[in-house]
Amino acid sequence: MLHFERLKLSNGLRILVNTDVSTPLVAMNILYQVGAKNEEQDKTGFAHLFEHLMFGGSANIPVYDEPLQLAGGENNAFTNNDFTNYYLTIPFQNVETAFWLESDRMLSLAFSEKSLEVQRQVVVEEFRQRYLNQPYGDAWLLLRPLAYKVHPYQWPTIGKEISHIEQASMDDVRGFFSKWYHPSNAILTLSGNITLEKARELSEKWFGPIEPKAAIKSNIPAEPAQTEKRILEVERPVPHNALYKAWHCGKRTDSDFHTVDLLTDILSGGKSSRLYNRLVKERKIFSGLNLYLLGELDPSLVVADGKIYDGVSHTQAEQALNEELFNLIATGVGERELKKVVQKAESAFIFGEMNIGNRALNMAYFEMLGNAAEMNLETSKYRSVTGDMIISKAAEIFREENSSVIYYKATNNQ
């Protein structure tokens, strides 16, 4: 059970504090409720671009990292389709430095053409290296728009195409910051050697003067139910054929999320899982195969991806995958099999909370979902899942008309 206390500033900033005097450190996490899904169709990749820009200097601090490192701290950030997250750890004696740094860049970034150009080139190069010039790198650029036709999950966090970042203007950047980076769209969490009283004092001092803005109401279109299978065939200069297949499922806050999570663990949770044993180890259909739940905030995907052994066709590989999915539905889940994945999920969550950085992130994440207190119910929700519930969800999800598949063909294997 993780204990925490709350406070809220008049400008709308939500603050959660978990006090742990056994550590000499404090972890600070700031989650901004803006991700790739909040971008415009012709201006994608901006949430990720901002993750980089936020380290380029703010109104009163030319270089973010320098004062943090001098105070003994370290930091990082990440962006996904639903939110952007910044986090740091610092010795408790220097915790005010963290409040100063984070409040200053929430107040105002140092918008300059030079900073924009530098970070734009960094992101463009990342786009090229990870998605365009790397074998199989464009798979997500292909799979998302195949599975989604209306919802903005149809593009990955890096963006829909590289030109959107290349053409990002200063007006675009200022507008994005003004719309999304302000107190009422942020959640600040603290875990470690800090009391609620100290957190209140420093929050009021550093974040309190930031002007409030109205909370944002996103109007994101719902993805219509998929009624027929979608197939895309592509050829690329890669070593081996690959298969990518996605099925629509529910969102993170659905009551059956934990059921679907355990379903994917049973099928592909390590080398003792069904898919690894049957399709990789025994039948040698795939040289490697993963099946996982994306778990996004809006209706999401279960995805399978695997490299296919030479001599096995895409049709044979997909048929073998389908057979294992249908076999699970037909034969059910054994008590021992279910117990193993439940214990794995429980231990991962419990051990994760031993780290103050993970605690701070979890508080922010679950608060974004609706209520941070829900994180204390996670293990009980996994324990409440039954084998029948898993089979029911498998039958609902693994329908061919609910799937989108890419036959990723290696040109040297033709």
Image (spheres, grey):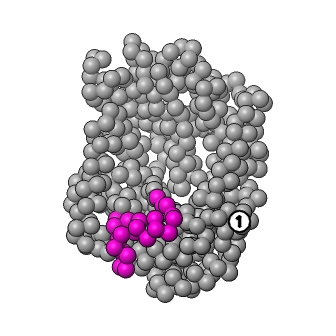
Which residue is more in the foreground, 386 or 46? 46
Q: How many marks?
A: 1
Q: Residue at x 77, y 29 (%)?
A: 336
Label 1 Cα neighbours within 10 Å, binned few <14 / some 14-19 / many ≥20: some
Q: Which residue is mark 1?
A: 20
For residue 357, above or below residue 340: below
Res 108 seen here: yes
Q: Secondary structure at mark 1?
A: loop
- Classify residue 360 by image quadrant: bottom right
Q: For the C terminus, give its image quadrant.
A: top left
**Residue type at mark 1?**
Asp
Res 255 seen here: no
> What percent of the width, then of the height, locates residue 247?
50, 38
Q: For the N terminus, give its image quadrant.
A: bottom right
Q: Residue at x 76, y 50 (%)?
A: 380
Q: Residue at x 28, y 41 (%)?
A: 132
> What percent of the width, then of the height, locates residue 362?
62, 59
> What percent of the width, then of the height, locates residue 21?
71, 67
For residue 210, above or below residue 134: below
Magenta stretch: includes residue 202: no
Q: Range of the magenta residues?
A: 53-76
Which residue is more in the foreground, 174 or 151? 174
For residue 27, above or below residue 260: below
> What percent of the width, then of the height, locates residue 198?
64, 79
Q: Residue at x 30, y 54 (%)?
A: 123
For residue 268, above or below residue 192: above
